[in-house]
Image: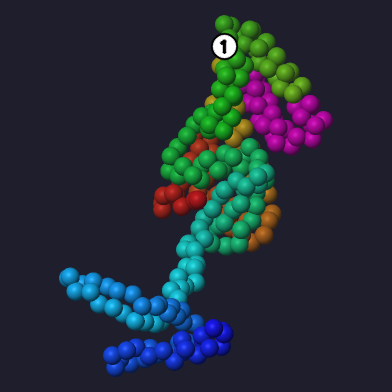
Amino acid sequence: MSPERTKRRTSDRRPRGGGTAAAPASPDDIVIDTGPFTITIRGVTFRVESTTLVGKPVSSGPASPPAKFPPPSHQFRRKGGLYQVVFEGGQPFYVVDTLGARYLDYLLHHPNVPIGAFDLEVAITPEKREARASNSIQPESDAEAKRQYREAVRRTVAARQEAEAAGDREELDRLDGEIEALKSALKDGREEADTGERARHNVRKALDVVIAKLANGDREEKAFAEHLRIHLSTGYECLYSQSEGRIWK
């Protein structure tokens, strides 16, 4: 039988028994013609000569767009060798990943929780705990204490020269703080290796470098620097005060 005749017979097919013809199919409809078959319902068998099933394809529809969350209004997050910063919903800017930036990262994400300067150093650089303990001076007499202080100054100055030759600005700032604390202790005739004093100098100077760079930046950076001057305190204990709690992501 030719395709043309088959098509004509299919389209002209009418249900028997006086039923109405199936509605003409649209181009998007799916049409299934079935031949004679029997169906038994409650013991009674019926013979169906032919039928046409017309339906439309089921579409899942367009994919739902991913849920959108508002960007954080405050963000201080490390990305590679930089920290991405968003302050009060402004344009993002970047802070170089230095020791001071890491101190700041810790304090911003632990608001209203005071931490000793030495403990903050150890939290960021755990090996400092052992190094500081081995370098601490435990004098048995004033003369011995002064000798140990002078030796500590000599070692620290030598380390500073190496950092200067390497162009390591961050290490220079840290060593300057240590030298200042050691010389101050030697001048005052103190007998303890003032771990807290050295840590205070180190943390304060590292944070001051970050804030000074922010203050020379664009509008958002200047605003962030001023925010830190108001809410950040550094001393033997360091603290980021924030009445709203943890706002930084």
Query: Does 186 sit above or below residue 52?
Result: above
Q: With respect to residue 242, does 180 lie above or below? A: above
Report the front residue among 224 and 198. 224
Under mark 1, the amino acid is Gln
Which residue does the image show at 45% across and 70% down from the upper left?
Answer: 60
> Furthest-right residue in view?
165
- Name the residue: 68% across, 49% down: 213
Magenta highlight range: 160-189
Which quadrant of the view contains residue 141? top right
Q: Is residue 161 left or right of residue 170?
A: right
Residue 175 among those drawn in magenta: yes
Q: Looking at this view, is 212 or 85 the one in front?
A: 85
Across and down, in percent, residue 90 comes to 57, 62
From where the camera sits, is residue 236 visible?
no
Q: Which image quadrant: the N terminus?
A: bottom right
Q: Note whether 92 is above or below 20 in the view shown.
A: above
Provide the residue designation for mark 1: 138
Give the image quarter of residue 24: bottom left
Q: How many marks?
A: 1
Residue, x 70% and y 20% (percent of image)? Answer: 153
Q: Secondary structure at mark 1?
A: loop
**Left of 27 or right of it: where is 208?**
right
The residue lying furthest to the left in this view is 42
